[in-house]
Image (spheres, rainbow, N blue to C red):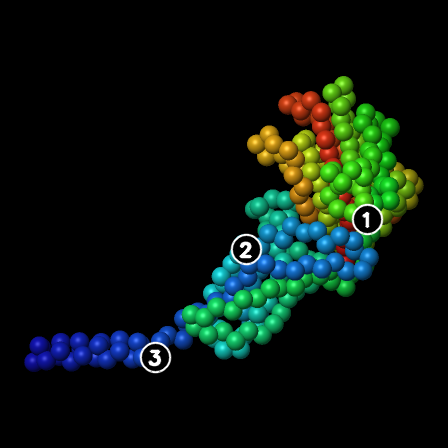
Amino acid sequence: MKTTSYLVFALALLLLNACNIINPDESLPGYVHIDEFELESAQGFGSASENITEIWAYSNDQLLGVYDLPADIPVIDLGTTNMLFRAGIRNNGISATRIQYPFYTDYRLDVNINAFETDTVRPYFTYKDIPPPAFADDFDSGTLFVAESSSQADFNVTNDPELVFEGNGSGVAVIAEDQQIFRAKSFDQNIGLPDFSQVFLEMDYKCNNTFAVGLYSYLSNGDETKHLALIINPTNRDGGEPQWNKIYVEFSEIIASTPNAVHYEMYIESNKDDNVSVAQLYFDNIKMLHF
């Protein structure tokens, strides 16, 4: 009798497995493949340079994960599925602080997902409907920065095509062998930023020396306070030639800490590193965005 029970149980298991083979598990995924995207600037926002490092993917508004490109994203919602993609950046250039960039639009579309099949998607991003940049300098017609009186190095514009990132010009500061300090700030721009607003600086740069960026805040009586936002590392890896990089620097904490400020000016400064004889710093497409 016991042997008969075992045989019946084994037969039931075989039938169950057979059913699973004939009717595969509905949670088997399909895939969305992304190997590239498009970013288009908006009128008044200047360059479309970007440093989108990953894609945040959603299926029917549920987060699937954060993916480096190229990516094959598994999706278990089969059939017509609403897919949402958001552009991810490294906040302040730090790989451990990956966020969705708040000023780029979402990309949403319906995709017919089938198990084990792959659909290729090319997300499209642009700037959201937000106020124009509170401050912008593309260096194509001079610059809005001036060297401060304490600076030993000047801040200039180069039109050399070999040195310019894009357009007609890029900003440049060279700290010579007999110099140590470079300091510059925006000149009489009276940058207005809403209290407690999310604020980001976008900037293209290349350099063989560390430098800092931040804001001066001004009270109605003219009092000035300097606020460091970030110290940025050189882009000449392994001692080679500096390479252009794009960074997104968040100024939100500075704005939140200065509710009585009536306006701001941006600053850039550099103290020559011990292992550098001549420091070279190049800048392009500086813009400050907020909601």
Task: Where is residue 169? Give x, y as percent.
Answer: 80, 42
Q: Give the mark, 3 or 2, whose residue is nearer the N terminus.
A: 3
Q: Is residue 103 above or below residue 26?
A: above
Q: Which residue is under mark 2?
A: 69
Q: Residues within 10 Å of mark 3 (few under 14, many from 20)?
A: few
In the drawing, what numbered circle is on residue 136? 1
Residue 46 lies left or right of residue 69; in this view the side is right
Q: What's under tag 3, amino acid-wise?
A: Asn
Q: Is residue 82 above or below residue 44?
A: below
Along the line of sight, which residue is nearer the eye, 219 or 123? 123
Quadrant assignment for the N terminus: bottom left
Q: Which quarter of the figure has residue 15?
A: bottom left
Task: Where is residue 286? Give x, y as percent.
Answer: 77, 46
- Which residue is rendered at x = 80% and y = 27% of the image? 153
What's the CA distance linking mark 1 and mark 2? 30 Å
- Which residue is rendered at x = 81% and y = 25% of the image? 152
Along the line of sight, which residue is nearer the eye, 162 or 258? 162
Quadrant assignment for the C terminus: bottom right
